[in-house]
Amino acid sequence: MPDHDVIVIGAGFTGLTAAVALMEAGCDVVLVEARQRVGGRAEAEYLPDGTRIDTGGQFFCRDMTHLVDLAKQHGAEEVWTYVSGRPSYRPPLAEQRGESIWQEVDRLRDRMIALDLSDPALAGLTVAQWIERQQDEDPAVLDSFRRLVMGLWCRAPEEISLAYLASNDRRITNVYPELEMFLAGTMQGLAEKLAARLGDRLRLSSPATCVTLMDDEVEVDVNGRAITARQVIFAVPPVMARQIEISPALPARLTKALDAWSPGCVIKLMIGYETPFWRDRGLSGSVRWSTPQGMYACDISHGNYYGLVVFIGGPLASDWHKRLQSELVAFVTDELASALGEEARTPRSTCVRDWVNDAWSDGAYSDVITDLHSPDAEDVLLEGLPRLRFACSELSPSFPGYIEGAIVAGNEAAQTVLWKLGK
Ligand SMILES: Cc1cc2nc3c(=O)[nH]c(=O)nc-3n(C[C@H](O)[C@H](O)[C@H](O)COP(=O)(O)OP(=O)(O)OC[C@H]3O[C@@H](n4cnc5c(N)ncnc54)[C@H](O)[C@@H]3O)c2cc1C
């Protein structure tokens, strides 16, 4: 007789959602998490003055209905991102030209999303190869599109599979801006509220190292102890799933599907100031860089905290990962000073979170498919095995790569497992 009905590995939003849904359906579930905290890629830190800020996943919008509902259910207060005023461009660009480039980039993205992926002419292409074929486009628009890919998917377009990106972006269906709001108590704070419902079903500092699949049960090794259950959910991103030893070895198609993914590279900086000085100049605090590629900033002020978040994604993040963080802060505040004003050189607080090669996610925001010859990697993983289910934001039918996607993926995994258990 197994110890439990279900073992869920990973207490990010996918695993937390799945575990809570299973618990509420009357299952005996245990959730094991490698870190000393819940939330996974949603993480927060306290500044010396007690302000809590998001160092991982943060923003959402009204289209992300599961997340909106979850926040409401737990009484989490929303903060609307400050967007009044003009955006800044680096190097400087007339606002009208900047806006028109962004509209064209959106149009190009729509064109990519609408591609017929069964067309043999598109098979095995990278995003960069597809961009090169768009010769009728303004080079500035193509350049900005590359920048968008690096900034959002955090790897070079030369590496990312076109079929993956088109299929992925099709499922990101927001009408409202994706940075529309965030939570005053942080996204990790919401994860903690969800985790509190699980009581002692949650085990922190409990990395799953080995999973043995048997005919009638699964065995998961955690801290040198074996736990058994009827089903296991791997609620970890693909690059982390392949670090868990599985016995007997996975069928070749599943190994290939896991190997198809690479982690994104991102560094997030939160720079706090005495006052939101940019607003006095009619600026929103949003900064769009064409050079260097892969940077973006916006206002994250809330309560008594005035600050900007700066995202660095893709090859630029890989480069900065190898250098001193003090040099990175100097570089970023210098850039912000050029875009918003000299006051940017004297922050009140700085917080740098480098996610490149992170111990338990290996990267962020999302893993992306870089194997150009694994167009079915997601479908194969979603099939899983009779006692094993893969679930994570990356594999979500809506908003993959986002917290909303993780919640949807967690719910779906719970429903599938309940069906398998006959509940
Ligand atoms: C800097 C940054 C900014 C982001 N910004 C946004 C944003 O603004 N909006 C948005 O919607 N999304 C954002 N994201 C993405 C979002 O955070 C993720 O898509 C989402 O949190 C993924 O949830 P998940 O549960 O699928 O995976 P994860 O959060 O990665 O959870 C997996 C969990 O599994 C654990 N784990 C791994 N291996 C093991 C093991 N062997 N045993 C036990 N546990 C293990 C990990 O520690 C982790 O807790 C951002 C991410 C980052 C890092």
Image (spheres, helix red, strand yellow):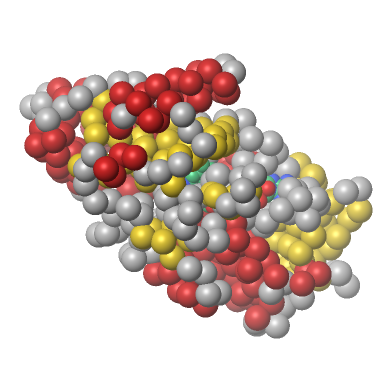
Left or right: where 229 falls relative to 1 = left
Residue farthest right in this picture: 225
* Residue in the picture at 18% in, 39% down: 102
Q: Front-most of 86 and 366?
A: 86
Where does the image place residue 389, in percent across and percent down from the top left? 62, 59
Residue 98 visible within the image: yes
Q: Residue at x 23, y 39 (%)?
A: 281
The percent coordinates of residue 324 (x first, y second) are: 59, 18
Up the image or down, 320 lies above or below 86; here it is above
Query: Image quadrant of residue 253?
Result: top right
Taking 370 as reference, is 51 left or right?
right
In the rendered view, tell whether residue 91 sits above or below residue 71: above
Quarter of the rendering containing residue 294? top left
Q: How many marks?
A: 0
- Quarter the N terminus occupies: bottom right
The quadrant of the rendering that contains the C terminus is: bottom right
**Residue 124 appears left or right of 92:** right
Q: Residue at x 70, y 61 (%)?
A: 8
Q: Position of residue 240 (x, y in %)?
A: 64, 41
Residue visible at 24% across and 34% down?
88
Q: Is residue 232 left or right of residue 377?
A: right
In the image shown, does 59 or 12 lie closer to the viewer? 59
Q: Is residue 112 visible?
A: no
Name the spot of residue 118 as percent of width and height, x first.
27, 44
